[in-house]
Amino acid sequence: MEIPDSQLLAGDLLFILVINFLLQIANDVGDPSFWLSGGFSQPVTMPVTLLAVVVRDSKMSISWVLSALWNRGYSSSSVADDETAAKKTLQIWIDYCSIRILMELGLSLLITHSPIGGWFLFREVWYAALVMTFFRICYGRYGMKF
């Protein structure tokens, strides 16, 4: 399968990574132990949650790309103007949410046998909706001119 706009694919993957880092920062700052350890004045060390970020990024990237491919979200017409870009992103996002929910249910039932973090999954898809809509509208306005 050929991807008509490989720059849009690369941008999607980059912004999924940005979403993951935003989620991780929100998790760390929201944890009471972060503030008890000194908050922003504590020494910077290698995060112990890096593996979780990589795993979450992989799940999110696979889900988003599959959804975008299904919805033909990598054609240049998918970001032709702001309204089209927002509508196409919403279509992609709806399928992305479905894939992510099914992925988490499947992993929980078949592999980990652990509860699903519903609040965290909700934040993940909410961040994805906002950031990816912003990125795709900006890409439609400015990205195709390079």
Image: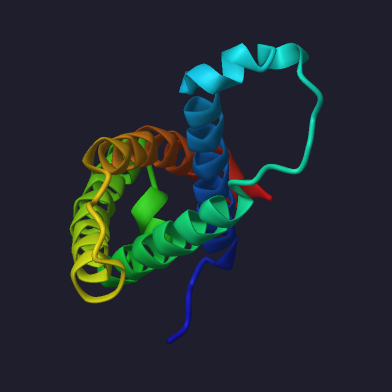
Q: How many marks?
A: 0
Q: Is residue 39 visible?
A: yes
Q: Residue 119 location, x and y as percent?
A: 25, 35
Q: Name the residue at 57% across, 51% down.
A: 144
Q: Position of residue 60 (x, y in %)?
A: 41, 57
Q: Report x, y in % for residue 114.
A: 26, 58
Q: Residue furthest bottom?
A: 1
Above/below status of 78 relative to 106: above
Vertical relation: 62 (above or below) 127: below
Kindly identify the residue that appears in the image at 49 percent across and 26 percent down. Answer: 26
Q: Is residue 79 left or right of residue 28?
A: left
Position of the N terminus by quadrant: bottom left
Q: How is the image coloured?
A: rainbow
8 with respect to 82 (left or right):
right
Q: Name the foreground residue: 77 vs 103.
A: 103
> Which of the pair 78/52 is nearer the observer?
52
Image quadrant where residue 101 sits: bottom left
- At horizontal 27% and vertical 50% (from top left) the residue drawn is 93
140 or 107, nearer to the observer: 107
Q: Quadrant of residue 126?
A: top left
State whether residue 138 appears in this view. no
Residue drawn at the location 21% of the way across and 70% of the way down: 106
Question: Residue 89: horizontal and vertical position, in percent?
Answer: 31, 47
